[in-house]
Image (spheres, grey):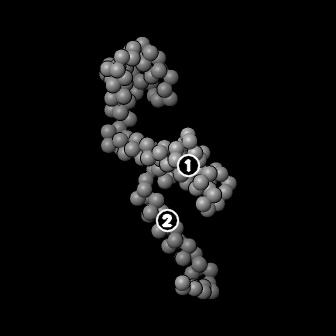
Amino acid sequence: MKILIVFSTSNIYLILIKIMDEIISKLAGIGFPAVVLLITMATTGLTGAAAITAALAMLGPGGMIGGIVLLGIIGLASDALTKYGLEALLVGVYKERISNGETKINLSQEIDKLPISRELKLMIKDEF
């Protein structure tokens, strides 16, 4: 273990910046699920392992395991959104639901309740 003794505040700031840069680069590699976990951890009011445990338990059903599964699903969803876009994903989901036997009237009412723009709602409805 190395002990680093720093006498000036500018050196402390440089060390902190390097540590933050390293943390940010690692979180960027994980992606959007890391951002969700960080925000949830911040809302717990806890620190360290307790914050991680509480955040994971808050995120998903069934405690920590549910939170981990939810983060995985968030990762898959964000990856799909970046590849195909929101419109293509929503159209695909509603076409699949129609092929599974759901009525167009019920789906149209559901689309009307979505928190998306009117134009996007009309585009989705036009596709089926």
Asked if one can make out residue 95 in the rendered structure from this viewpoint, the answer is: yes
Asked if one can make out residue 41 in the rendered structure from this viewpoint, the answer is: no
- Where 3 sits versus 63, above or below? below
Residue depicted at x 35% and y 33%: 89
As rendered, which of 93 and 48 lies closer to the eye? 48
As rendered, which of 77 and 113 lies closer to the eye? 77
Residue depicted at x 44% and y 64%: 25
- Where 35 sits versus 18, above or below? above
Disc 2: which residue: 23
Secondary structure at badge 2 equals helix
Measuring from the top left, give residue 128's x and y in whole percent: 32, 19
Does residue 71 appear to the left or right of 40 in the view shown?
Answer: left
- Where 116 sits versus 69, above or below? above
Quadrant containing the N terminus is bottom right
Disc 1: which residue: 64
- Where 28 sits versus 40, above or below? below
As rendered, which of 103 and 127 lies closer to the eye? 103
